[in-house]
Image: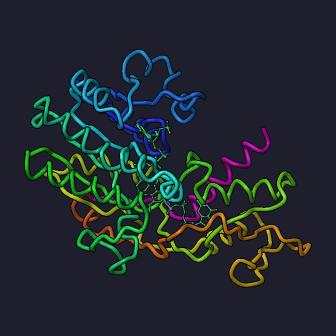
Amino acid sequence: MKKKALIFGITGQDGSYLSELLLKKNYEVHGVKRRSSSINTNRIDHIYQDPYQKKRNFILHYGDVTDSTSVSQIIKKIKPNEIYNLAAQSHVAVSFEVPEYTANADALGALRILEAIKFHNLQKITKFYQAGTSEMFGKVQAIPQNEKTDFYPLSPYGVAKVYAHWITRNYREAYNIFASNGILFNHESPRRGETFVTKKIISAMCRIKFGKQKKLFLGNLYAKRDWGHAKDYCLAMWKILQYKKPDDFIIATGKQYSIKQFINLVAEKLKMQIIWKGKGLNEKGYNNKKEPIIECDKNYFRPLDVNTLLGDSSKAKKLLKWKPKINIKMLIEEMIEFELKNISK
Ligand code: NAP
Ligand code: GDD
């Protein structure tokens, strides 16, 4: 019998890569999508439109993690072997604007799924994966961060994810549910949402290079992130649920770059020259015609920002035999290639 997986957040960046991975592994993949006023399935349309997958292995359901009835009914109906909770209001800056909704979806969403597993007595059938985040480390208490590092979240998003992390551990210990936390550092891809910094930079710089945009406005250029590729990280999620017992794992590359360094790497790949001048809000990136093409805008700064994130994934390397295959230069190359194809269309 085929294994059944249920993905909350299937229409997101990770949901799409995880679906592809699980289908390759011969799972029957169920996904929960929300109703939206415009189409939100762009990242999975290629799977859904494949007649073979559509008929047999890839099934979508309407639901929402803020709606316990839909969560419970879908889980009761499918009785999945694996549930991946990737559903979240995942934008850190937005979480300052909609903190209550972020808590409802990102914190209580995990609780609703765990409750449904418990309520329908699926402890022996269903394993649960919670999409935790390096944002939980916030004001970092150690460098690099590992599974033993204390959390100190700096945003409503980070705080909500800390709740989801602990409720996952609580249901593991209290009710014997196979419930694991991945603590994933930033991961990107051509399918990354447009308003996250890597996608925003690459998309704008490609457009600037071909004269389709004049300037790129950004916030904090000095925050440092440990960036990996979503494809590698989705493999880690699956491995976490195949491990012999439920546990918590850091997934990271162990390498860190600032936003400014990331821009310089993109410029190098695009053969664009950027000369940086000025300080603070007046810092600007100039092209070889001495025109400012990158500027700071105070609207893109957050009330609090996480200045540095660097993960130590030795535990995952040792126990899961996981390590990232795609480095930052390969990631940038793939994202640029995708963007240039879009521009030429
Ligand atoms: P993403 O592209 O923003 O996808 C989020 C998904 O959640 C989308 O499918 C979205 O649906 C869905 N969703 C949002 N609110 C929902 C709700 N109330 N009910 C049901 N579904 C809802 O995020 P991602 O980059 O794939 O990340 C996946 C998960 O990993 C998220 O939980 C994120 O917080 C976490 N994470 C991400 C990273 C990273 O660097 N990417 C790192 C650590 C942890 P719509 O398409 O309809 O909006
Ligand atoms: N989005 C954005 N837009 N970020 C900017 C900008 C801008 O114009 N300018 C500077 N930044 C800085 C942010 O202040 C932050 O320090 C850094 O770039 C990264 O921002 P994002 O790409 O929005 O990612 P994030 O690190 O806040 O959150 C992502 O990674 C988390 C894991 O650490 C998201 O995917 C979260 O869902 C995820 O949990």
Report the quarter where the N terminus lies.
Answer: top left
User: Which segment did they paint magenta?
Assistant: 321-345
In the foreground, 37 or 128: 37
Residue 98 falls left or right of residue 152: right
In the foreground, 224 or 307: 307
Residue 157 falls left or right of residue 36: left
In the foreground, 314 or 207: 207
Q: Kindly identify the residue that appears in the image at 44 percent across and 45 percent down.
A: 14
Which quarter of the figure has residue 210? Answer: bottom right
Q: Kindly identify the residue that appears in the image at 22 percent across and 46 percent down.
A: 242
Instruction: Name the chief secondary structure element in magenta.
Output: helix
Residue 179 position, x and y percent, is: 19, 48
Is 222 situated above or below 159? below
Residue 148 position, x and y percent, is: 23, 72
Q: Kindly identify the residue that appears in the image at 66 percent across and 47 percent down.
A: 338
Total numbered circles: 0
Residue 94 position, x and y percent, is: 53, 54
Residue 140 falls left or right of residue 296: left
Report the quarter where the C terminus lies.
Answer: top right
Q: As drawn, which residue projects farthest toward the right?
A: 289
Membership of 332 in magenta stretch? yes
Q: Kindly identify the residue that appears in the image at 13 percent across and 44 percent down.
A: 177
Is 84 situated above or below 271? above
**According to the image, what is the colour scheme of the structure?**
rainbow
Residue 208 position, x and y percent, is: 81, 58
Residue 242 falls left or right of residue 101: left
Is 91 situated above or below 282? above
Instruction: Report the image quarter containing ligand 1.
Output: top left
Membership of 242 in magenta stretch? no
